[in-house]
Amino acid sequence: MKKITIYVLMSLLFVPFMVSAQNEQLPTAGITPESSFYFLDKFGESLRSFFTFSKAGKARLQVIFASERIAEIRVILEDKGVEAKGLEIAESRLKANLARMNEILSGEKEKGKDISILAKELDEDFDGPRNILKETFKTEKRALEIKIQELRIKIDVARQALDATLVETLSKELDNLKIQKDLLEKKKDQHNDELDQEEDKLEREMDDKDEAEKAILEAEKERAETLEDATEEGFVIPATVIEKFDGLIAQAKELLAKTNYQGAEQLAEQAKKSLEKEKDKNESLKDEREKDEDLKDEQEQEKFEKDNNRLKKEQGENNDGNNDGKNDDSLDTEESD
């Protein structure tokens, strides 16, 4: 009876998770850190780790758990935004999962075992979830930018209608959205840095050829993403930058064919960094434009308040003048009587 209970419990823990992981690149989020029952999620993962006996299996489990953390982050961001309390918990556990995976690999390597194939498989397994995490932050950023633009339009309409109360309310909403966007940017950069660090550790466990091939693949992926971002966000990547990138990748592939793996990896990384530098430059220009828009908003707000105060003052003076006129009429009436 006890054996049956254990088998049923293990089935409940394993089957739904693995099926969803196969159907998508991410498992279902399940219970998120926002729930008071989140401890059940931790207990379930501890139980699964306990019943997984091989080190390779335990390392693969950490990739699955890390993928679930990303699913949780995506759900939290979509439902409650970047300021949600549970987000930090999911982020912390994601980092811990990846660190544990690399810890297992390092332990096996110290025992003299060849882990290069396993490291490559783990890296490939986590490639999809890693990209989904990056896309999640990118999507959330676009959503915030759209809301910011919509609010700016509403503020302009409210100013034209001389509705000071509505302008003040909408301006506060706009400031809050800007704060959320800044926080989202910081978290995105933090995730990218942490994921890159764990990926670097993983790649060190792979052989030189695999690292060179992966570096070239990552650089080419960066090219595609950069051009896509340029189209969506309306900035231009100079043709000379693309030509330089293509030339470096061509050289990297030549060195790869000649078994100069380190040289190939270095050229691929150089090509990738050249695009990242261009993206950073365009991001800085975009930030400057946003600062200009913010300054324009502030100036328009100040002008609106001055005009509004002036109108109130003029209306007050007109009312005083009308009252004086009425008083004069009253005096004239009394004198005639």
Image: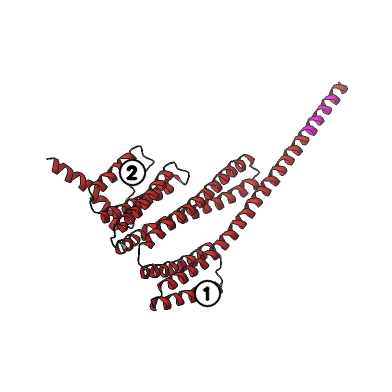
Amino acid type at image mark 2 = Ile
Q: Which residue is mark 1?
A: 244
- Label 2 element class: loop
Residue 5 has which mark? Answer: none
Q: Which residue, given by chain and number where applicable, does mark 2 sit on?
A: 31
Q: Who's the residue at 82% across and 31% down the image?
A: 325
Nearest the eye: 39 or 37: 39
Q: Which region shows up in magenta?
A: 319-331
Q: Position of residue 91 (x, y in %)?
A: 41, 48
Q: Is residue 13 left or right of residue 209?
A: left
Determine whether, in the image, residue 180 is placed left or right of residue 158. Answer: left
Quick check: is 28 in the magenta stretch? no
Indicate whether 161 appears above or below 242: above
Can residue 155 be spotted in the picture?
A: yes
What quarter of the picture does the N terminus occupy?
top left
**Quarter holding the C terminus?**
top right
Write down the quadrant of residue 260 in the picture: bottom left
Going from N to C along the chain, the mark reached first, 2 or 1, is 2
Q: Is residue 27 visible?
A: no
**Image location (x, y in percent) of residue 2:** 14, 40
Give the residue at x 53% y 53%: 145
Residue at mark 2 to residue at mark 1: CA–CA distance = 47 Å
Quadrant in which residue 259 is drawn = bottom left
Colour convention of the picture: secondary structure
Q: Nearer the viewer, mark 2 or mark 1?
A: 1
Q: Residue furthest left?
A: 1
User: Which is the main secondary structure of the residues drawn in magenta?
Assistant: helix
Amino acid at pointer 1: Lys
